[in-house]
Image: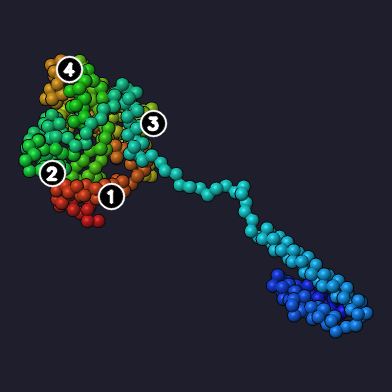
Amino acid sequence: MDDLRTKYLEAIAGAGDESALEDLRLQAVGKKGEVSLKMRELGKMTPEERQVMGPKLNALKDEINSALSAKKSALADAALDERLRTEWLDVTLPSRPRRQGTIHPVSQVTEEVTTIFADMGFAVAEGPQVEDDWYNFDALNIPAEHPTRTEMDTFYMHKAEGDDRPPHVLRTHTSPVQIRAMQEQGAPIRVIAPGRVYRADYDQTHTPMFHQIEGLAIDRDISMANLKWCLEEFCRAFFEVDKVELRFRASHFPFTEPSAEVDLRCSWEGGTLKVGEGDDWMEILGSGMVHPHVLRSGGIDPDQWQGFAFGIGIDRLAMLKYGIPDLRAFFDSDLRWLRHYGFASLDVPSLAGGLSR
Ligand code: 2NL
């Protein structure tokens, strides 16, 4: 009896896990366990012997059962301690950084330029991106035989059989917006027209869709001196420098007379642009005095009114200010969109190189 007691209590104390413990329970107090077998032998004993052995065996069985359950909960406690020691989580750690979206550089620059001219009293004008050829060309004094009017350069909308409306194009500049503004508001007027424009061109420096801001100021005696001050003021604000120097180069546009392309004094040291100093000139925009024919298209009497206009390419300005090396990074998906609509101009040789990439 004492041997059995010692044997099982020691074995239980030394059990390494729950299944070893279960094996011991079956060996000792299971149906065919050693203690159970001994209990069965009670029947063959004399009543006197049974009176002594019965309680002893019952006590042994109880002692083994409580040793088993004590060991069982000790093992469970140890297992929990082990999990708590190894499976921990530091809830005070900072979260993993997530990439944040930003405003597109072209939108950013459009906003900046718009704000600068708005501060000078220009109102923002908007209009359709699909225009008829009168608003896009004729109103701007661009003659019928001008090369920019061909499908080589301009995206024409397909026309259904029997459609006798004038040809429609994707606007090639935002000038038609200003023609509409003149017709609606009359003179005097000061507007800027930012937006998407389209030309059939695709290479290192041209994309079929790009962004422009045009400005227009009409009054009784607006002159090129006013144009010069406005543009200098714009450059000071946009490039965030106190001193800027502009160079007006004689040029030609059908919609202005005289016309000038405007360069900005700058330097490129170690690949970084500095405005207002240095020996380089950077072309930033085209401008001029609004042609009398164009004023008339807008319903304004050129004998009473005159004014200046200018056009700025936004995309290159965004690249300059925010250091974007290749324009085409912006536009790969838009090309597929243009082809989806089946514009014939996409199949001319000047675009084929870009599209087959
Ligand atoms: C350029 C040239 C220019 C204009 C745009 C304009 C608009 C009206 C009347 C007269 Cl409604 N002119 N716009 C004038 C001169 C130049 O843009 O090279 N832009 C990047």
Instruction: Work out whether residue 76 can be spotted.
Output: yes
Residue drawn at 14 percent across, 42 percent down: 156
349 and 194: which is toward the camera: 194
Q: Earlier in the sequence, mark 3 or mark 4?
A: 3
Q: Earlier in the sequence, mark 4 or mark 1?
A: 4
Q: Earlier in the sequence, mark 3 or mark 1?
A: 3
Q: Nearer the viewer, mark 2 or mark 4?
A: 2
Image quarter in which the N terminus is found: bottom right
Residue tagged by mark 3?
A: 240
Q: Are marks 3 and 2 in contact (CB under 8 Å)?
A: no
Q: CA distance from mark 3 to mark 2?
A: 45 Å
- Name which residue type carries label 3: Glu
Q: CA distance from mark 4 to mark 1?
A: 44 Å
- Name which residue type carries label 2: His
57 and 15: which is toward the camera: 57
The quadrant holding residue 84 is bottom right
Disc 1: CA contacts within 10 A as few (<14), some (14-19) or many (>=20): some
Mark 1 close to ligand 1, CB under 8 Å? no
- Name which residue type carries label 4: Trp
Question: What mark, if any, has residue 305 been given in the picture?
Answer: 4
- Circle 3 — which element? loop
- Circle 1 — which element? helix
Q: Nearer the viewer, mark 3 or mark 1?
A: 1
The quadrant holding residue 86 is bottom right
Mark 3 close to ligand 1, CB under 8 Å? no
- Compared with 348, 110 (above or below) is above
Q: CA distance from mark 1 to mark 2?
A: 23 Å
Question: What mark, if any, has residue 332 been given in the picture?
Answer: 1
